[in-house]
Image (cartoon, rainbow, N blue to C red):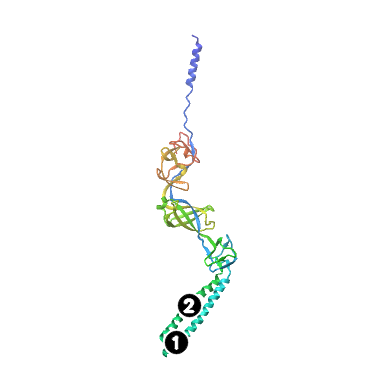
Amino acid sequence: MKPWPALLLAALAVTACSEKAPEKKGPPPTLITVVQVQPARFEVVERTLGSLEAVLDPKVGAEIAGRIVAVHVHGGQPVKKGQVMARIDPLDATQQAAADRAEVARLEALLGQQERLVTRQKELVERNFISRNALDDVTAQRDALRSQLAAAQARSEISRHGLGRTEVIAPFDGNVEVQIVSLGDYVKVGDPVFRLISNARLRANLPFPESAGPRLRIGQPVRLLSPMAPDSPVEGAIEDIRPTLLEGSRAIEVIARIDNPGALRGGGSVNATVITGAREGALMVPEQSVVLRPAGKVVYVVEGSKVRQQIVRTGGKEGGLVEILDGLKGGERVALDGAGFLTQDAPITVKGAPAAAPASSKPQ
């Protein structure tokens, strides 16, 4: 047997023994940020999309009959309390006032004549020249004239006041929403001339689902946010809860009245938040920290260089935070950014934390 094959086999065996098997490495640590669980005040809220309408939105009518001879304001224009918006031809009112004054004068003359007749009849009765029945007749006629005169005087006073009502006056500061009449139109007493609106005070109509009914109360604070003023929330309170549900939607209609800071307008939409309750000392974590796993909702609690998976029971949400009802005690540090990539005992590196100590060092 030749020695070369034996030597080659021996060399291969020595080489194989001198090579070490490669070591298995675990997964690299996941870079995360953390947040500490702290007790905080948690507000229980109900949210809805509602609408605004003006509290003052009347139709201003004509107080006398006549033809419109001047229109001083038009739709969209602002008006001040006491401002003349239109004028009605005073001719009819003037003639009516004159006729009423003439009627008063006529009845005064008749009553004076009747008073003198009653006086004479009394004298004749005392002398037994006429019967008592004749005196009673003229006395009754006098009393009837007195009643007619009182009615005529009242009508004359009304027509006299009507002479000052030929001007259509703005009853408050606001804006002309609709100009109902035009120059030359004939209006009767009570006919609408303008529709005014004031945005100084607004009413918010807020529909809520039936399920929210037991939690809604008059006086609860309301926070309103309008697209016209997205950075300026307005605070108010529930003033009324309608006793019946809205037909069709079966929603509960809640009414809140607010003072307009200036940017809101009737007819606009508004996002409403009603604070139905509050809990002090609630444990809150960012929604991002709660991860859905087969075991349920979990958070990852930082323990040294690893994390522990902790099952939690959650409550309400507010402002990007979720309430933890069970599973945490407070004070724990839980994963925030990167939580969705973690598992039980996963190695982690906390962003911004000091560099890890050498393996021979004791854990911090």
Q: Position of residue 260 (x, y in %)?
A: 51, 58
User: Looking at the picture, does residue 246 appear above or below residue 133?
Assistant: above
How many angstroms separate mark 2 from mark 1 (CA)? 22 Å
User: Looking at the picture, does residue 275 appear above or below residue 165?
Assistant: above
User: Looking at the picture, does residue 275 appear above or below residue 346?
Assistant: below
Q: Which mark is residue 148?
A: 2
What number of labels is visible? 2
Badge 2 amino acid: Gln
Q: Position of residue 122 (x, y in %)?
A: 43, 87
Res. 81 image quadrant: bottom right
Describe the element under mark 2 as helix, strand or loop.
helix
Describe the element under mark 1 as helix, strand or loop.
helix
Badge 1 amino acid: Gln
In front here: 332 or 20?
332
- Residue at the top extreme? 1
Q: Is residue 255 visible?
A: yes
Q: Position of residue 17 (x, y in %)?
A: 47, 20
Q: Which mark is residue 281?
A: none
